[in-house]
Image (tube, rainbow, N blue to C red):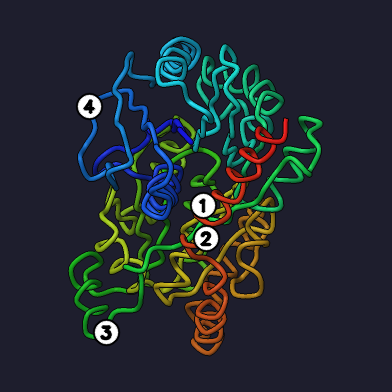
Amino acid sequence: MRIAVNTRLLLKNRLEGIGWFSYESLKRICIAHPEHEFIFIFDRPYDSEFIFSKNITPVVIGPPARHPFLFVLWFEFSVAYILKKYKADLFLSPDGYLSLRTKVPSIAVIHDLNFEYYPKDLPFFSRNYYRFFFPRFARKAKRIITVSNYSKNDISTLYHINTDKIDVAYNGVKDIYGPISKEGQQAIRDEISKGKNYFVFVGALHPRKNLVGLFTAFDLHKKQSLSKSKLVIVGNKQYWTKEIKTSYEQMYHKADVIFMGHLSPNRLNEVISSSLAMVYVSYFEGFGIPIVEAFKSQTAVITSNVTSMPEVAGDAALIIDPFDISDIAKAMNTIESNPDIRKQLIQKGIDRVKQFSWNHTAEAVWDSITKCINAKTTN
């Protein structure tokens, strides 16, 4: 079987949510199935670390797909051409984008539909591309993979897709994450927060991550509790909007906010493990990988009561209303003032994270591929 894969998000030192899903699942699948050939389709020069095994043939074809107009050119023409040239039996797209011009059976990994609920959070052309094409991709796909039962039901409801066609493959968490020593934690705090305790946020600085609410809640927490804690922000300023910028600049305690940019997994583990808690109060997520990274790093978690986050967190986090600033601030105060509750959450997180592994993710993705292959053989 010749399986073509959209690997445009395998970017050296720039892997984020979907990129990690691609990396971790594809690495395991390709190594575990040497009987199949995999065609990795890149839109720019690739790094050799992404050629995981001998049964992978890398192909680079332009144009680099980083804008809606280029999405159309790359998927509808370049990808369609490669699928035909290499006589692919199946096309797997870990970021959900498909080619509508090919008859090759396709699997779309649609992580979430945030653009349907908060279109104004995205640039004009991007949101219109997503809202026009993704319903068509969902109907075109032989099977759909998503990362939570919330997203499965959401895709089914909004796009009128039978749930039998949608498989769930939870995200995993890298083995590199884990607790570090008390001495190591203090050293990290000495380095990045002048020895003070801190809360941490991890993710692309996108409007749906609710940074406006987080900044406002942190200010309120500091005011109410007279806390000396800091707020560490980890992630690239992907969509640093005017609203986010204004909310930050208007903070009374903005000097206590520390921006660290993108971090390597090793460094990220140190920063998370040394924190008081992960504060992940998005108003929309298809999964929320930082939640399980925090569980594995053995710190407490504060997260939202909407979309997929309660499903992922279970009873191992403080669950708050992301639209209620006082609720977020109250949770931060609870973590800081009640070490027993924090310890209980950490223990629950240690148990909870056992449900999430990249091995399970890869197995679920391969199971979906097998269903598609078997359906093709039957037909």
Alpha carbon separation for disc pair 1 and 3:
32 Å
Vertically, is 339 above or below 122? Answer: below
Residue drawn 54% across the image and 18% down it: 99
> Which residue position holds label 2?
220
Q: Which of 294 and 229 is in front in this view?
A: 294
User: Picture quarter containing residue 36?
Assistant: top left
Alpha carbon separation for disc pair 4 and 3:
40 Å
* Nearer mark to the viewer, of 4 and 1: 4
Q: For residue 227, say whether it is visible.
A: no
> Which residue position holds label 3?
181
Measured as percent of width and height from the top left, residue 135 is found at 69, 24
Asked if labels 3 and 1 touch by Cβ distance under 8 angstroms, the answer is no
Asked if labels 2 and 3 touch by Cβ distance under 8 angstroms, the answer is no
Q: Nearer the viewer, residue 139 or 28?
A: 28
Density class for disc 1 (Cα within 10 Å; few <14, some 14-19, many ≥20) is many
Identity of the residue furthest to the bottom in this view: 340
Density class for disc 2 (Cα within 10 Å; few <14, some 14-19, many ≥20) is many
> Which residue position holds label 4?
45
Alpha carbon separation for disc pair 4 and 2:
47 Å
> SS at mark 4?
loop
Measured as percent of width and height from the top left, residue 212 is found at 51, 45
Please state if 56 lies on the left or on the right of 188 as rendered. right
First of labels 4, 1 by sequence position = 4
| Residue type marked 4 | Pro
Q: Which of 147 and 50 is in front in this view?
A: 50
Residue drawn 53% across the image and 54% down it: 288
First of labels 4, 3 by sequence position = 4
Alpha carbon separation for disc pair 3 and 2:
31 Å
Circle on res. 216: 1
Alpha carbon separation for disc pair 2 and 1:
6 Å
> SS at mark 1?
helix
Measured as percent of width and height from the top left, residue 204 is found at 41, 43
